[in-house]
Amino acid sequence: MTTMAQSELHDFAAAYALDALDPEDRWTYERHLDTCERCREEVSSLRETGTEMAYATEGPEPSPELKGRILLAARAAPQMGAVVPMRRRWLLPATSAMAVAAACAAVGLGLWANSLRDEVGRQQIVALEGNPGRLIVSGKQATLVMCVPEAPAGKSYEAWVFENDVPRAAGVFAGGCRSVELARPVRQGNTVAVTLEKAGGVEAPQGDILMSADV
Amino acid sequence: MSEYAITLASVVGRRATPSQASISDEQLLKAVGGGDHDALGVLYDRFGKVAYGLAFRILRDRTLAEDAVQEAFLALWRSADSYRRERAKPSTWILTVVHRRAVDLVRREEIRRGDPLESAPEPTSGPVDEDVTLRSRRVEVQAALRELPEDQRQALELAYYGGYTQSELAERLGVPLGTIKSRMFAGLAQLRKLIPEH
């Protein structure tokens, strides 16, 4: 968390609900939302009211062709759950955790998508092999930020930390664009990898490694 | 097959069209998340008009407004399976995506943003075939906005329809940032009381 006072953060709720925060404040506040359930509830309530303003607008009708264009474009656009989206911004080297978090938030459309806790400067960002996402390492805490297809029925993604080539289970997660905090600490020399396993996870990896990163 | 691969047809059976009205927004989003193009079409039928009205109010340009709506619906298409009911009602979530796209676009394009208070569109009777429910809701929300204290209404409208950030607003109106924050918060709280539940 930045040096911003908690009380100041709480004042952001209404502006956030109206999409009226400046980009940096929005990013900071979204990190705060990760840890503040009361704030999430407050924002939900304020946003619900703010969105009512959408219904007060009036103006021209959209062109009759717009629906067809949207449906046509959707046929050409992969879904999160279908294909790993190789969005251009993911292919650019990340210059900061903020860029990664912003991309994740933009792709995932979560209202508080990221859960990166530490200050930007102390983070190590490692590109993943096999996926355009990133591994963010802050001290011993590692977070995967990536998009993966929806897991097939009966399957889950499972993260692993390889310590001296011994895999340790580090958490199970579903598909979509997300940030996943690993349940095991990482150290220099470890490798983080993700496999597809039986739903709920297994004790030792059996599936192929879908993506990995050396710390 | 993914657990999300629920198609509109599986939700409503073969006779999809007559039953579409009974499908909840949430079921629709789930079907969209499962890759159902028909469900995306129904979602557009339900929200396209409001979405476009909102985008047009912000962008004041037909082409840009259509771009914003198209981008928003594609974003919904790509990420409908990340929708979580506990965070927002489907309608709130959908219109939030539309609002963000339009606001991002108005800021990126550096369109000269007029004062929504000065140039709010003239009330019209709306198209003859306009949905009665939508029309009455519009009247309700417009009336609620008119009942707000002037400074609160101004803050809400410049932020929500003008796409101004809170610091831009403070500068534009020549008041401290804290005042803007209070006006926005009080305005939303007051608006909540004035708008009937839906």
Image (cartoon, rainbow, N blue to C red):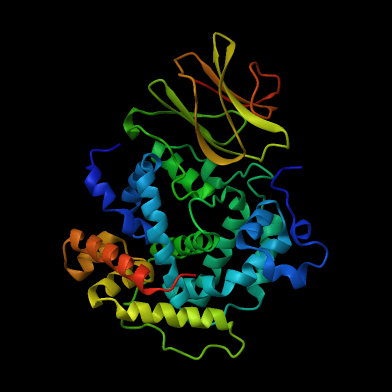
> Residue A136 is drawn in which quadrant?
top left
Depicted A1 relative to depicted B102: above or below:
above
Q: Quadrant of the N terminus of chain B?
A: top right
Query: Percent from the top left, x then y, of residue B184?
Result: 28, 64
Residue A96 can be seen in this image: no
Q: What's the residue at 73%, 48% (across, down)? A: B5
- Outermost residue toward the top? A164
**A111 to the left or right of B9:** left
Query: Percent from the top left, x then y, of residue B58?
Result: 42, 72
Q: What's the residue at 22%, 42% (across, down)? A: A5
- Label tally: 0
**Which one is nearer the viewer's eye here, A106 or A180?**
A180
Depicted B100 relative to depicted A197: above or below:
below
Query: Percent from the top left, x then y, of residue B194?
Result: 36, 74
> Residue A123 is drawn in which quadrant?
top left
Query: Percent from the top left, x then y, of residue B69?
Result: 55, 67
**Which one is nearer the viewer's eye here, A24 or B24?**
B24
